[in-house]
Amino acid sequence: MKKTGNQLEPAAANGLLDRRFFLAGGAGLAALAAGGARAEPLAIPEWTKKPGAWFTAYGQPSKYEAKVGRGAIVEHNPLYESGPGSVRTPLQFLEGMITPNGLHFERSHNGIPDIDPDRHRLLIHGLVKRPLVFTMEDLARYPMTSRISFVECAGNSGALYAKAAAAGTAQALHGLLSCAEWTGVPLALLLDEAGVDPKAQWLLAEGADAASMSRSVPLAKAMDDALVCLYQNGERIRPSNGYPLRLLLPGFQGNMNVKWLHRIKLTAAPTMTKDETSKYSLLLNDGKVAQFKFQLDAKAVITKPSPGFQLKQQGFYEISGLAWSGNGKVAKVEVSADGGKTWAPAALSEPVISKALTRFRIPWHWTGQPAVLQARCTDDTGYTQPARDVLIAARGNRAAYHNNAITSWNIAADGEVKHVYV
Amino acid sequence: MSMFKRAATVLIAAGFCSRAFGATETPMLGKPISPADLAPWDLSIGPDGAGLPSGKGSAKEGKQVFADKCSYCHGSEGQGQPADRLVGGQGTLTSDAPVKTVGSYWPYATTLFDFVRRAMPLNEPQTLTSDEVYAVSAYILAANGIIKNSEVMNAKTLPKVKMPNRGNFFIVYPGNLK
């Protein structure tokens, strides 16, 4: 830790401290501690003086955490009984890198199907030597792989294309993002069993939902690290996330990780489905349309503090957030408290895993003056996420998808946190 | 060099380690299925039109199908709300308020058939006949001025329809756009 006598030396302007402050055991804390009133006298609470509740078959969060839920991003349309929609992960209320299953974001194109696993089938056909059908019981007997991987909708953070900074929490702006441990059968094993024709370069993955949602996937990705998943964080995948079977394509846009997977067709060329032409393509400034941008580029978001938080007094705060890259591991996260003029490196919480969310932290001493907090991620390819004006200059405002610009949270003198552009 | 290292070197040289999951033993439980038996699931239609079913329809027939099955969500003339706008928007893609429709944005007419057949109408997908899907596809294309009202869409004509925005699409993969 950089110290001069007993004084902490800032790592960047506006109160950012050295990330090693935590490791050094907080020397100098006394100098920063807010003086204050004494604590209330202590009494024995009633829950200590009577037996607690009995067990339940499936545990639920504390009733005192009822605020931690997935808000809908669009008003439920009265014309539809269920239909298309999404709900977002409340990033600002969570810690660590894993998203609880009940809080994983959801996007569906025509409701959540009620699939009987005994009647569900996976068909592999097209440019293969042997078209094959697998039951879920069959797949459960195959060798499995587990990996921790984020899933992010390509439309996540799309609000940052808007010309004025949208009001919203981390959840509303960036909550189409979650991370779980996924377990399943490597797709390569199943493709090998079917015998891939050398003419095949792509495959179509299709769901059994009422949208029959379908996407083309490069065969190279399927053979590299694609998983046909049965489990999410140790339990069978939730219906809303694809029960009983979903495709996982680590680092690729969420929509391609097809839920309720029931068909894979090997093809020579992309099928050009609705969701890979009219949607999930990027309309650029000159009217050209970039298609098949699959990887989600490096991004970082500060979750604490973020809009909805109210800083109550000046003094010590931990800034914490999530960083990730669809192209590899997070190599570095830097944080600024002065709108990007000066930066200090944050500490990365282990484990740091390729194509998984990574938790970062940095100590901060808020002086009570206005501040603009930013975080930016650099991945192990050497790529650093761009400032918003740089991204917009390169790509325009109409691209809708794959916005990985730096987010700015303004801290007002009264401690209110708001999304702003700088 | 140990036997193990030598074996690993041979495997690498042979390409077995070129991907995350090497040659792993599996129970080989996949059951073969004939093309006829899997046909009901083989719904996808690529840009070459391969797999398009028999049947036909023009905008004239499609107008009624659209009114009965589509207009509730897409508007009486395909103007949208509450669901996507399907008609118009040509010339808006470089403006401040781009309007992405089948006519202004979609690069392939085959996608229209594929999507309508698999997913529309929202409240009862996969209930339209092939004739109805061809007809309503023709209606949407004609409403966008891409084909004439009298033109018949079928397995031969639909893949030949030239979508106005086709030339603006370019493929990023295997590169990346940053």
Image (cartoon, coloured by chain):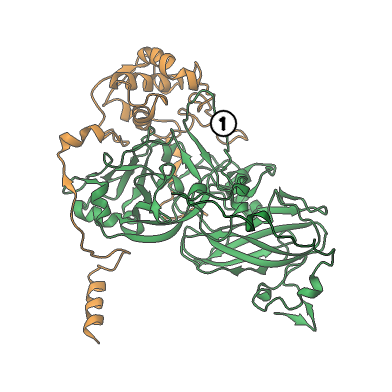
Which residue is rendered at x = 26% and y = 51% of the image? A139
Locate residue B55 relative to residue A416 in the image: left or right: left
Viewer-nearest residue: B28 or B65: B28
Locate residue A263 relative to residue A320 in the image: left or right: left
What residue is disc 1 on? B92
Viewer-nearest residue: B71 or B173: B71
Residue A171, x across and y down, in percent: 60, 47
Tell me if residue B114 comes above or below residue A195 in the rendering. above
Colour used to depict chain B in the structure image: orange
Report the residue that reaches farthest toward the front: A50
Q: Examine the image and state in which quarter residue A304 appears.
A: bottom right
Q: Examine the image and state in which quarter residue B133 appears.
A: top left
Residue A338, x across and y down, in percent: 75, 61
Q: Quadrant of the N terminus of chain A?
A: bottom right
Q: Examine the image and state in which quarter residue A121 appears.
A: top left
Residue B110, x across and y down, in percent: 34, 31
Tell me if residue B55 comes above or below residue A367 in the rendering. above
Report the residue that reaches farthest toward the bottom: B1
Residue A101, x across and y down, in percent: 47, 50
Tag 1: Cα neighbours inside 10 Å, few (<14), some, or many (≥20)? some
- The subunit letter for the residue under badge 1 reads B
Q: Which chain is green?
A: A
The amino acid type found where label 1 is placed reads: Thr
Viewer-nearest residue: A380 or A83: A83
Residue A343 visible in image = no
Tell me if residue A239 comes above or below residue A4 in the rendering. above
Residue A115 visible in image = yes
Locate residue B144 relative to residue A26 in the image: left or right: left
